[in-house]
């Protein structure tokens, strides 16, 4: 059987080899590879479509290994599995224990912060952009939990629509 | 159709200007005679059962600020609700300023007109945001027409559009930019990299933001419109206090810069759905339908059959808002003919 995966990889030489080497021992064959360079994002990441062929068990092992290696799998057989969502926190983001804020978001089963950028403004206030990878369809739940944390810390949340 | 206009500020004057510009076309197209028989502002009124001259009304108001100075028919003793007892008319155009504390004088004027079996067209939001169901029920009890397209989005068609053009579809949610002032401020902060404070001051100098900008920047105006859309389009029974409101006054230029870097813009977004009634600054993608600039308003209606439908239009402006009022008048006239 075959499985089509869309992975998100950094568009530099050797990235695909790096992630395929660990799964080469599971008995699956790589049938096609398409690098979608037209869809490169601002972080230099591109979707890479691969098709693997093999026994069901081998294919499951391959997918599990990719997940273990924290490779972003955007789609499995056309089904969107991950999405990146963005939110900005404004206020005393640092003084209200930013480590705690990030840990609490990362502890959510559905969410993982993949990028954080902070800019300081006046009076110790700051603005922080969080890019969060989440399971597809979990956006509203993740945002509502972030809102809870922000309310507790008197931060303004600017969530993605 | 004999029209009584109460409130002769920017919107009221726009209505009179629009009638002056369009009455011949309206007569030819719809066989409808629009005649302004009474106008009231805070100085008094002008009353003529035979019809007031629209251009003269505008001229007197612009030169003296008082409609009561209208030659021969001006009257400083009668104004506001008093006018309704001193004139025979068919439709009240209620264009007084929005009052979100009490909904007055719009509520009393509207209910009085209903009681007198008169139709009402309004651009006002306050009374609708506070007493939507009460007012609608009174219009039904009295078997009169009540239309308020201009109260949401100015010239942007949304209420009539949803009810008539999208009649086959169920509207599941509405997400949009319902306040032009905040959209202008956030658009300028994005293009110029300026601070909120400086951009607000610039908007005040340009006459886009009010001297007291709180109704706009704190999301109050957009929340009133959210109530109106929720009740009138989605059938959600709610009032102003049910809306979760966050304004834009804490948005920093740094936050806008961070958003820009990720390919996003910050907009004050109203969300109307069964699960969410809120106004808050949100991130929207550049190049998405939400990325409208300047004072424009927009709304995306999510429907069951037609999928997403987006409308965009000028959310404020004297003649633009008047266009929606005039359309409501024509629609009432068509129903009566």
Image: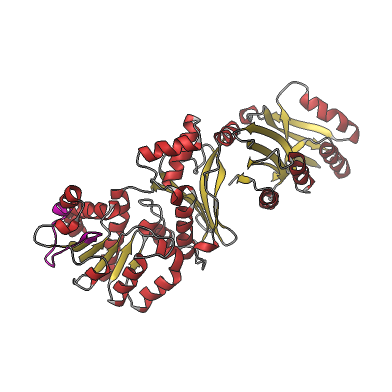
| Residue A108, horizontal then vertical, whole percent | 77, 48
Q: Is residue B33 above or below residue B315?
A: below
The answer to whether any part of residue B178 appears in the image is no
Quadrant showing the N terminus of chain A: top right
Q: Is residue A121 above or below residue B243?
A: above
| Residue B92, horizontal then vertical, whole percent | 27, 66
Q: Is residue B274 above or below residue B176?
A: below
Colour scheme employed for the rendering of this structure: secondary structure
Q: Is residue B41 magenta?
A: yes
Q: Residue at x 82, y 30 (%)?
A: A19
B262 lies left or right of A107: left
| Residue positioned most to the bottom | B141
Q: Is residue A51 above or below residue B38?
A: above
| Residue positioned most to the left | B72
The answer to whether any part of residue B134 appears in the image is yes
- B21 vs A145, nearest the viewer: A145
| Residue B328 occupies quadrant | bottom left
| Residue positioned most to the right | A25
B277 lies left or right of B27: right
B23 lies left or right of A64: left
| Residue A29, horizontal then vertical, whole percent | 83, 33
| Residue B34, horizontal then vertical, whole percent | 19, 61
Q: Residue at x 17, y 47 (%)?
A: B63
| Residue A114 occupies quadrant | top right
- B150 vs B197, nearest the viewer: B197
Q: Residue at x 48, y 37 (%)?
A: B197
How many numbered dots are placed on residues in this image? 0
Question: Magenta region: which residues?
Answer: B40-57
| Residue positioned most to the top | A13
- B178 vs B22, nearest the viewer: B178
Q: Is residue B252 magenta?
A: no
């Amino acid at each position: 059987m075959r499985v089509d995966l869309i992975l998100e990889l950094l568009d530099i030489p050797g990235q695909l080899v790096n992630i395929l080497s660990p799964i080469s021992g599971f008995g699956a064959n790589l049938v096609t590879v398409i690098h979608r360079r037209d869809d490169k994002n601002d972080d230099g990441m591109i979707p890479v479509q691969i098709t693997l062929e093999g026994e069901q068990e081998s294919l499951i092992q391959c997918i599990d290994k990719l997940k273990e290696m924290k490779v972003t799998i955007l789609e499995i057989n056309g089904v969107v599995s991950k999405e990146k969502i963005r939110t900005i926190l404004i206020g005393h983001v640092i003084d209200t224990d930013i480590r705690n804020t990030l840990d609490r978001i990362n502890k959510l089963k559905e969410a993982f912060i993949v990028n954080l950028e902070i800019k300081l403004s006046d009076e110790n206030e700051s603005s922080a952009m969080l890019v969060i990878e989440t399971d597809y369809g979990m956006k509203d739940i993740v945002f509502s939990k972030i809102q809870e944390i922000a309310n507790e810390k008197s931060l303004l949340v600017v969530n993605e629509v | 159709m004999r029209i009584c206009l109460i409130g002769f500020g920017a919107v009221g004057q726009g209505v009179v200007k629009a009638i002056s510009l369009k009455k011949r076309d309206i007569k030819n197209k719809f066989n409808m005679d629009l005649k302004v028989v009474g106008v009231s502002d805070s100085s008094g009124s002008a009353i003529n059962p035979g019809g007031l001259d629209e251009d003269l009304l505008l001229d007197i108001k612009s030169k003296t600020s008082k409609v009561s100075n209208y030659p021969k028919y001006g009257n400083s003793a009668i104004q506001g609700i008093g006018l309704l007892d001193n004139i025979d008319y068919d439709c009240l155009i209620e264009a007084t300023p929005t009052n979100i504390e009490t909904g007055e004088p719009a509520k009393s004027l509207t209910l009085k007109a209903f009681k007198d079996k008169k139709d009402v067209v309004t651009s006002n939001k306050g009374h609708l945001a506070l007493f939507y169901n009460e007012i609608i029920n009174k219009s039904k009890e009295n078997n009169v027409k009540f239309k308020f397209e201009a109260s949401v989005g100015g010239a942007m068609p949304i209420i009539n559009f949803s009810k008539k053009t999208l009649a086959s579809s169920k509207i599941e949610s509405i997400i949009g930019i319902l306040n032009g002032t905040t959209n202008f401020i956030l658009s300028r902060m994005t293009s110029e990299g300026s601070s909120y404070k400086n951009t607000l001051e610039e908007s005040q100098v340009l006459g886009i933001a009010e001297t007291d900008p709180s109704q706009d920047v704190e999301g109050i105006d957009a929340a009133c419109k959210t109530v109106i859309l929720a009740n009138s389009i989605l059938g959600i029974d709610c009032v102003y206090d049910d809306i979760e409101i966050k304004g834009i006054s804490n948005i920093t230029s740094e936050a806008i810069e961070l958003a820009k870097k990720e390919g996003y813009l910050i907009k004050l977004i109203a969300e109307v759905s069964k699960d969410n009634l809120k106004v808050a600054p949100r991130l929207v993608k550049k190049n998405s339908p939400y990325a409208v600039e300047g004072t424009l308003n927009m709304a995306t209606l999510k429907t069951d059959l037609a999928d997403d439908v987006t409308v965009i239009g000028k959310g404020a402006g004297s003649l633009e808002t008047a266009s929606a009022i005039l359309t409501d008048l024509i629609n009432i006239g068509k129903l009566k003919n």
